[in-house]
Image: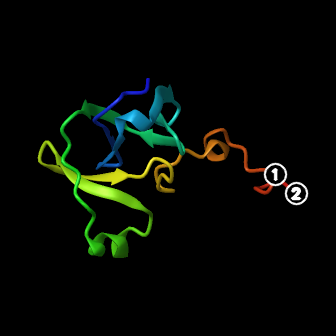
């Protein structure tokens, strides 16, 4: 699905997120919502809002790093709502799909495990 330009904007748990469209490798439906495959892994989305060519990304303020310790590529506004633009090579842990949890595989360490 690689889109040459713009940004893919999606919603997850009420917040808006975006990545450069050229670094999106695919979209697919999953048990926990949509899966957005980016160069750094798979992130989950409740819904994809747009592939927008004109998202004005600005550097993230220092205060954001105090609230959100994960790497941030910038911030923007989409349809009057704030957007966190993530680095798709290092997506935030809160958005990364964990296949072990989704498929119920706890590696044998959970109840009844080793």
Q: Residue furthest right?
A: 114
User: What is the C-alpha distance between the residues marked 2 and 1?
Assistant: 6 Å
Residue identified by numbered label 2: 114
Looking at the image, is 74 positioned above or below residue 99? below
Q: Nearer the viewer, residue 69 or 21?
A: 21
Q: Nearer the viewer, residue 24 or 101?
A: 24
Q: Position of residue 76 (x, y in %)?
A: 21, 52
2 or 1: tag closer to the N-terminus: 1
Q: Nearer the viewer, residue 30 or 16?
A: 16
Q: Residue at x 43, y 69 (%)?
A: 69
Question: Does the rendering let one see residue 104?
Answer: yes
Looking at the image, do the residues carrying marks 2 and 1 touch, with CB atoms under 8 Å apart?
yes
Q: Residue at x 38, y 52 (%)?
A: 86
Q: Residues within 10 Å of mark 1 (few under 14, many from 20)?
A: few
Residue identified by numbered label 1: 108
Q: Residue at x 31, y 33 (%)?
A: 5
Q: Which image quadrant for residue 11? A: top left
Q: Nearer the viewer, residue 24 or 31?
A: 24
Q: Position of residue 67 (x, y in %)?
A: 35, 72
Q: Residue furthest top?
A: 1
Horizontal side of residue 35 vs 48, given as left or right: right
Q: Position of residue 52 (x, y in %)?
A: 23, 33
């Amino acid at each position: 699905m690689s889109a040459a330009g713009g940004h893919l904007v999606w919603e997850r748990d009420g917040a808006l997120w975006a990545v450069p469209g050229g670094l999106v490798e695919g979209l697919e439906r999953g048990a926990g919502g949509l899966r957005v495959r980016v160069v750094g892994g798979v992130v989950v989305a409740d819904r994809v809002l747009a592939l927008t060519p004109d998202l004005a990304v600005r550097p993230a303020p220092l205060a954001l790093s105090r609230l959100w310790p994960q790497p941030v590529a910038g911030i923007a506004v989409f349809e009057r709502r704030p957007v966190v633009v993530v680095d798709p090579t290092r997506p935030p842990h809160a958005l990364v799909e964990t296949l072990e949890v989704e498929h119920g595989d706890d590696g044998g360490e959970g109840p009844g495990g080793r």
